[in-house]
Image: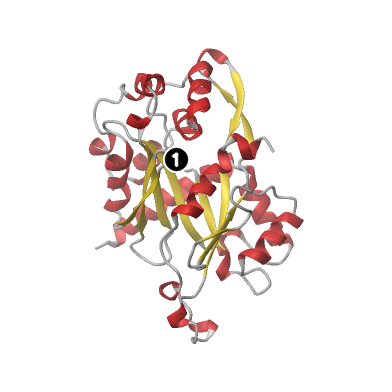
Amino acid sequence: MTTSSTTQTLDAVLDGLMSRYSERVPDVHKVTDAMIAAGIIQSAEEIENDHIAFRTMGVPNLGLASFGKIFSHYGYERRDEFNFTGKKLTAYWYSPPQPHYPRIFVSELRVHELSDEAQRIIHKYTDTVTSDPVDSLDLDDAEAVDRFLHQPLWQTPTLADYQTLLAESEYAAWVIYNRYYLNHFTISVHNLKPGYNTIDEFVAFLESSGLRLNSAGGTIKISPDGGLRQASTVAQMIDAEFAGGDVFRIAGSYVEFAERRVLPEFQHLPTDQITRQHRREGFETGNADKIFESTFTTQTGR
């Protein structure tokens, strides 16, 4: 059960995440500015955030076991587990305490499945975290949680270590540099005005606005039941400074878009009666598997 003080804390934590994410990811403003210019919305505050996603490392004191405690404290509930065999990832999604909050999707790299060299590099950095940092965090202190979610938990890697990881696991390379930074947020397309409220219409709008979209598995990723349709921008390349002062262009973050269709048993309802509970819930492994590649060189190098 969430209290008013817990809700206020969650609001502040989410505000902190989104403000810094917007600063770091130019596509956020590109998309919202284009939507305002087209008259789809009047301000960014009108956008419904379908979900936000984080990437973590499966190592002692970190990963899902640690990260999950943060949002569980604010009333989020862990739901389905997902397995990404090729990318060696495990993920869960968390349902929010109230419908207006975004869902949360957290993935974890199964480090023990990587090569010995990749494991050695990862542990060289993550082994400096000798206890679960969330256990010593006051989760009722929004400023403290905000600082934690935006501070490095280990030393900045060397470029050589980053490039070695990149060759084996682009996910590992992204996390070893970015740590716990929010990976992306997602615009709920189905709640936009007619003419833009299907993923096909919205993708056409994005492409006409000059946005580069992830083409892995097709520009629009569709769940087998047809109820969840997703797309995303390609992460822009940013200049990153590594240990020793080396600078190298790496993938930043991206923006995702999701259309959740009305479930068959509710399709008789008038449009003005459709709420979140009437739409396709959860996530889809096949869709998410390709969305991950928004930061991969196969997309950023196109």
Figure check: 106 above or below 265: above
Question: Is residue 246 visible to the viewer in this orientation of the structure?
Answer: yes
Across and down, in percent, residue 63 comes to: 33, 38
Across and down, in percent, residue 188 comes to: 54, 63
Quadrant in the rendering for residue 283: bottom left
Quarter of the image that includes the C terminus: top right
Across and down, in percent, residue 204 comes to: 71, 61
Quadrant in the rendering for residue 155: top left
Amino acid marked by disc 1: Gly
Residue at the image position 63 percent from the left and 54 percent from the top: 219
Residue at the image position 66 percent from the left and 49 percent from the top: 213
- In the picture, measured across the screen, residue 64 lies left or right of residue 152, that is left
Quadrant in the rendering for residue 259: bottom right
How many numbered marks, from 0 up? 1
Quarter of the image that includes the N terminus: bottom left
- In the picture, measured across the screen, residue 24 lies left or right of residue 16, that is right
Across and down, in percent, residue 31 comes to: 66, 53
In the current view of this chain or complex, which residue is farthest to the top? Answer: 244
Residue placed most toward the observer, 67 or 164? 164
Question: Is residue 236 visible to the viewer in this orientation of the structure?
Answer: no
- In the picture, measured across the screen, residue 98 lies left or right of residue 166, that is left
Figure check: 152 above or below 253: above
- The 10 Å Cα crowd at callout 1, few under 14, some 14 to 19, many 20 or more, is few
Colouring chosen for the image of the structure: secondary structure
Residue at the image position 68 percent from the left and 50 percent from the top: 30
Figure check: 258 above or below 247: below
Question: What kind of element bears circle 1?
Answer: loop
- Residue beneath disc 1: 86
Residue at the image position 24 percent from the left and 36 percent from the top: 136
